[in-house]
Amino acid sequence: MRLFFPQSALDRWVEGGEATLEGDVLRRGDAVYRLVSGVHFRGTDGGGTDTAQLVGRVKDAHQLATMGVEVIAESAVLGDVAYIVTPGYLGLLGGAVAQQTPGGNSGGAEPVSDEEAKLLSQFLLEKA
């Protein structure tokens, strides 16, 4: 399962002792996640049209580089469109995460539908 963790939530969890972060491995309770940096696209900035259909989606650093998206703090630019983003990390749950490669799919992880991933990411963003 792939989840998005806003940077602000990770900071709060680690500072509050609710989670530990060792390299790219996050441990929170019984859950262990391998982290890859990424962003959640919240909207367009300046009235631009989201022709790439990124709003509401989460992309990892590899996907962003492949697409040619430039991220600076809480903004991202693709072509002539500026986006408002939430920086953070995509976390892969479970033992298969050690086999994950950026932008790829780990062989042992159970696939999650886009709708399930969106709902869970939205829940985590609201709690951040």
Image: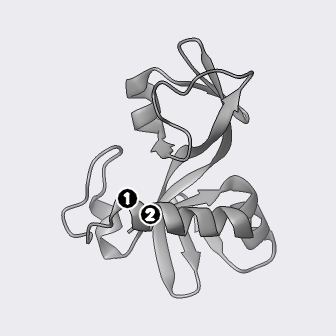
**Is 83 placed left or right of 52 in the picture?**
right
Q: Residue furthest left?
A: 107
Which x, y percent locates residue 77? Answer: 60, 21
Q: Which mark is residue 93?
A: none
In the image, 17 versus 45, the foreground residue is 45
Q: Residue furthest bottom?
A: 30
Q: Is residue 34 visible?
A: yes
Q: Say if 5 sits above or below 80 in the image.
A: below
Amino acid carrying label 1: it is Asp
- According to the image, label 1 marks what residue? 114
**Is 109 placed left or right of 41 in the picture?**
left
Q: Say if 57 sits above or below 21 in the image.
A: above
Hey, which quadrant is residue 1 in on the image? bottom left
Hey, which quadrant is residue 29 in on the image? bottom right
Which x, y percent locates residue 92? Answer: 41, 64
Residue plotted at (51% across, 24% down):
69
Q: Secondary structure at mark 1?
A: helix
Which x, y percent locates residue 110? Answer: 26, 72
Q: Which mark is residue 117?
A: 2
Residue plotted at (44% across, 63% down):
117
Q: Are marks 2 and 1 in contact (CB under 8 Å)?
A: yes
Q: Is residue 2 visible?
A: no
